[in-house]
Image: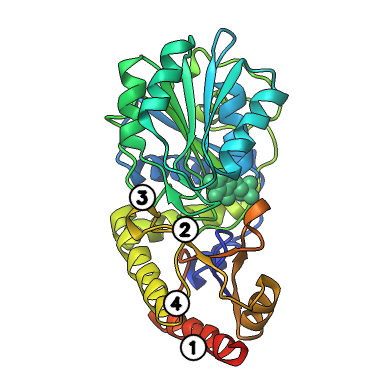
Amino acid sequence: MILLNPGPVTLTERVRSALTAADLCHREVEFADLQDTIRTRLRAVYDLDERWAAVVLSGSGTAAVEAMISSLPGADARLLIIENGVYGERMTRMAHIHGIAHQTLRFEWGEHIDSDRLAAQLTDGDFTHVAVVHHETTTGRLNDLAAIGEVCAMRNVQMLIDGVSSFGAEAIDFDRLPVAAVAATANKCLHGAPGAAFVLVRRVALSDATPCSLYLDLAGYCEKQDARSTPFTPAIPAFHALAEALAEHEDEGGWQARRANYRRLAGQVADGFSALGIQAVLDADESSCVLRAYALPVGIDYDALHDHLKSQGFVIYAGQGGLAASIFRISTMGAIDTVDIERLITAVSSIVHNRL
Ligand SMILES: *Cc1c(COP(=O)(O)O)cnc(C)c1O
């Protein structure tokens, strides 16, 4: 089965076989070495120096985002959360649940984040942090971190970034952005297995951190991991797979090579679909390299398209919420290639031609 959903992804054999590594106790030196390897390789993805820490968690991407949002703002913080899709809205729910003083800056799903509105709202409130999703997987829109970062830097506001579906394949300028942390996961652009997630955090940002949760206390994890330990039982097979996936990521040329590859495949999908009359929701230059949303072809509902493609060996992804009836999504992450996309287009072509 070829997974075209935005994570988990189709694994390479190299990563899949790491899942069956020998049984390991997390209190033994072999686990400490594995964890150190992952932490070092995670920083290496964007060439981050010692001012940054990679904190590895067991859980899905949401666990990493929630650890970041609940731990980092600190007791006196005021958080502005930018929403233009499901994942921005999810961060607002986290802030609400954890009792963090916050406001939202709301855009329509898929809408461009207007820097002037952001600047105006930051001027009105006494904000210390802005939370934003880099790639809003809801629609495939890649939010412009540089433009948002510029506004934040002028007002001395730190950024908390949900990079779950961009880390490892899109540019993230850790040096120039006023970023405190980026949260992400093993099983999207890094091509690891589900179960491990992580936060790349500026070490100075950890000094203000206040835990809002026992299990998602980011500073607590960091302290233990710096001491080559871990507070709880980790998802060890997923850690093995992440270490291997990071080695593979580097061998294949890092995030730049991954972006080039995703772009090539996404372009192939878009061109093939366009020839069948299926149009992308956003322009290519507004979309991430990772995923694009397409309008469902007239007369074909999502379930029919999904079930037909599944019978041909492909899993696609529905639109969320109000978009469920009008769009579908194709991610080009994972171990897939040009030949797979050719087969996908042939399979879509057969349903389009049968229905029209
Ligand atoms: C996938 C995703 C998440 C987290 O999803 P999980 O199911 O918890 O792994 C968060 N944010 C974005 C932008 C995502 O694409």
x, y (%) of residue 29? Answer: 56, 41
C-alpha gap between disc 4 and disc 2: 34 Å
Q: Which residue is mark 4?
A: 273
Label 4 vs 1, first from the N-terminus: 4
Amino acid bearing label 4: Phe
- Indicate if the residue with disc 1 has its beta carbon within 8 Å of ligand 1: no
Contact flag, marks 1 and 3 (Cβ < 8 Å): no
The residue closer to the viewer here, 319 or 156, is 319
User: Label 3, on which residue?
Assistant: 170
Give the residue type that dot 3 points to: Glu
- Label 3 packing within 10 angstroms: few (<14), some (14-19), many (20+): many
- Report the mark closest to the observer, 4 or 2: 4
Mark 1 neighbour density, 10 Å: few (under 14) some (14–19) many (20 or more):
some
Q: Is residue 207 above or below residue 20?
A: above
Which residue in the structure is indicated by mark 2? Answer: 244
Mark in front: 1 vs 3: 1
In space, the residues marked 1 and 2 are separated at their CA atoms by: 33 Å
The residue carrying mark 1 is 346
State the residue at coordinates (64%, 77%): 300
Percent x, y of residue 298: 58, 76
Residue pictured at 52% horizontal, 57% vertical:
192
Q: Is residue 65 above or below residue 311?
A: above
Lower sequence index among marks 1 and 3 = 3
- Identify the mark nearer the N-term, 3 or 4: 3
Assign the C terminus to one quadrant of the image. bottom right
Q: Is mark 4 within 8 Å of ligand 1?
A: no
